[in-house]
Amino acid sequence: MNTSNYLINLIRSTVRNEMPMEKPDDISWQDLFDLAKYHQVVELAFFSVEKLQNKPEGEDKTKWMRGHERCEVIDILQREEAEMIVEQASKKEIGILPLKGYILKQIYPKTTYREMGDLDFLIEPDKVEEMDSIMKEMQYKPNDVGLEDSHDVYKKDPYLVVENHRRLLPPTEENHWYTDDIWERLESYESNSYHKHMTWTDFYLYHLLHFEKHYSMGGSGIRGIVDHYYIMTKLKNQIDWDYVKETLPKMNYVEFEKMATDLAIALFEDGKMTEELEKSLKFMIDSGTYGTFEAYQKFQYENYKKEYGVKTKKGYFLRRMFMERERMEFIYPSLKKHGWLLPFFWVHRLFKAVFTKRGKVKREMEGMKKL
């Protein structure tokens, strides 16, 4: 926790544009860099490290400088590529909505401060196949296209990963009702009617949906709290807080939003931490940017016990293998008209997992032993 506390101190100094405290002797530069990388906040920490009197030297200096330079390069590539993808989609008259990190970058003081692993877009529902052609024309290689519940993944070496979402939340998610009609609420930019954006109120609520999903299912790192702080401070006059207050109870997010807000204020403003906030912070520190697979699997197991009455690990395994028809319909839409195909699609999904996702299957089997 000493290392994580100091990392938070560096991030706070960058966020508040203040002088950071010098690094304590019992914290190594290597451990600090590894933790910053684990949470994708290298750049946020770097700008405070640069203000220190006792800066890293030798190999430590090289790692921090390379981390900083990498962030700058990837930031430029991602932003330029996002603009090109929007442009190409618009030429084909495809509605497209940039999501998550790409929008958050615009809120941060410097776009490099907000690192992101991939570019996310919501694609007009009936134009997904056309968008697939555009991605291939742009030299992206399909990866898990048509295999994921809600998005298609494309890669372009060495740094670019794009996720094109068919919907914001699958129908199996508790709060999918809020995003099901999102296209009716989106607004267009004056210069491009196909380039869409959310209202800042919707953006805030979607941020909470995405943040809480990661937090509860596998954990979410401290970058999520930095995001939350910038949204609530930079956009506070552009969000309809009465509407938020009215909507949160329907989502069952009153407590989560309070935790996120209180923790953000404690970390970046008044420093008043409670025991509960300390627990939440420790969970985030342990989770890293995207959470841990172990935490996700434990969440799934407990959820299956509660929702489906699963009592044993064997029962959990069988339920995971032979998913309920509603979720299978989302993966295989033809089931909606031809329900008799369900057993065949169970077999298809099994073989697909064995031959295309062996690593994930192996990890899940090993993880089950620890449940």
Image (tube, rainbow, N blue to C red):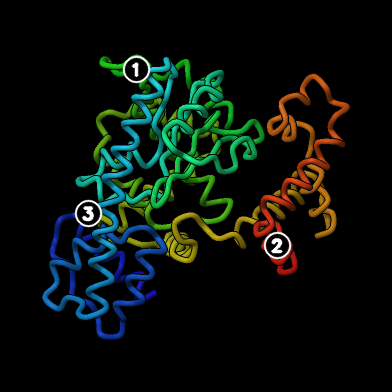
In the rendered image, the vertical position of residue 299 relative to residue 5, given as above or below: above
The N terminus sits in image quarter: bottom left
Q: Report the disc number at residue 15.
A: 3
Of the residues shown, which amino acid type is indicated by label 1?
Ser
Tell me the residue at 33%/37% (across/down). 81
* Measured Cα–Cα span from mark 1 to mark 2: 44 Å
Residue 314 in sight from this viewpoint: yes
* Measured Cα–Cα span from mark 2 to mark 3: 41 Å
Q: Position of residue 215 (x, y in %)?
A: 51, 51
Q: Nearer the viewer, residue 351 or 293?
A: 351
* Residue highlighted by disc 2: 362
Query: In which quadrant of the rendered view does residue 250 lie?
Result: top right
Q: In the picture provided, is 157 more to the left or to the right than 229?
A: right
Mark 1 secondary-structure assignment: strand
Q: Position of residue 322 (x, y in %)?
A: 82, 44
Q: Earlier in the sequence, mark 1 or mark 3?
A: 3
Q: Report the disc number at residue 229.
A: none
* Pair 1/3: label in front: 1
